[in-house]
Amino acid sequence: MNDGRAKLAALAVAVIVLSAGLAYLILSYSNGTARVRIACIGDSITEITGYPADLQILLGNAYNVRKFGVVGATILLNTDKPYLNQTACSEAEAFQPQVVVIMLGTNDARTNIYPNSENLEANYGMLIAAFQTLKSHPKILVATPPPIYNNTLSLSSSNLVQGVIPRVEQEATTMNVPTVDVFDPLLNHPEYFPDGVHPNVAGAEKIAQIIYAAIVKDS
């Protein structure tokens, strides 16, 4: 009888331990701690469009995609809204991502900002370095901004193509960070950008597909 009670007690303890372990795994999974953390850094194209959500769907539950976009954010520090100085940047760092996707530069092509963009490379390097020094040692992907079409937002396609994108790519090379070409696949597709700048549902899905391919390529 005593042996029987001892066996039952041992079984009960085992069940409790197993249940606790399972509960911990479920809790960890739901909190994202057991998943690959991806931080999407950017401006309004990241904050107000569906590309990060689409990326989450493509990657599945093994990944935890979060967006840290800021409407109007720039690479340049000499503007009203440099990304490096935004709360979203601090929140992204606190997230300790394992992958960081940076897609900035559209607002740096603004007609009243671009003439003072001589420090664009250096400022982009500072942003990259801020994430390179995280304890999570994330893989960083520098995504070129999508094309700019006719718009009423004072955003210049020529500034983007001739100045911003080449300098972004050059700094990424200098910092030994891979680039993701979002621009070329969306070129000649103005139907994806109703206001000339922000992608619609189809455009956001296309961006997500491009970023997805770059993430899974070396994983």
Image: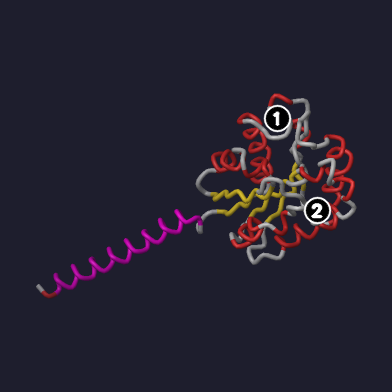
Determine the secondary structure under disc 2.
Answer: loop
Q: Which residues are magenta?
A: 3-32
Q: Quadrant of residue 37?
A: bottom right
Q: Quadrant of residue 98?
A: bottom right
Image location (x, y in percent) of residue 168: 82, 48
Magenta-drawn stretch contains 99 = no
Which amino acid type corresponds to the residue marked 2 in the rendered image? Leu
Report the quarter where the N terminus lies: bottom left
Determine the secondary structure under disc 1.
Answer: loop
Residue under pointer 1: 195
Alpha carbons under labels 2 and 1: distance apart? 24 Å
Looking at the image, the residue that sits furthest to the bottom is 2
Crowding near pointer 2: few (<14 within 10 Å), some, many (20+)? many
Main secondary-structure element of the magenta-colored stretch: helix
For the point 68% across and 27% down, the residue is: 194
Q: Are marks 2 and 1 in contact (CB under 8 Å)?
A: no
For the point 76% across and 40% down, the residue is: 181
Q: Quadrant of residue 92?
A: bottom right
| 133 sits to left or right of 60 | right
Residue 86, compared with residue 48, is above or below; it is: below
Which amino acid type corresponds to the residue marked 1 in the rendered image? Asp
Image location (x, y in percent) of residue 9: 20, 70
Residue 166, compared with residue 22, is above or below; it is: above
For the point 68% across and 38% down, the residue is: 210
Residue under pointer 2: 76
Question: Of label 2 and label 1, which has the lower sequence position?
Answer: 2
Crowding near pointer 1: few (<14 within 10 Å), some, many (20+)? some
For the point 67% across and 62% down, the residue is: 137
Q: Report the front residue among 74 and 61.
A: 74
Which numbered disc covers residue 183? none
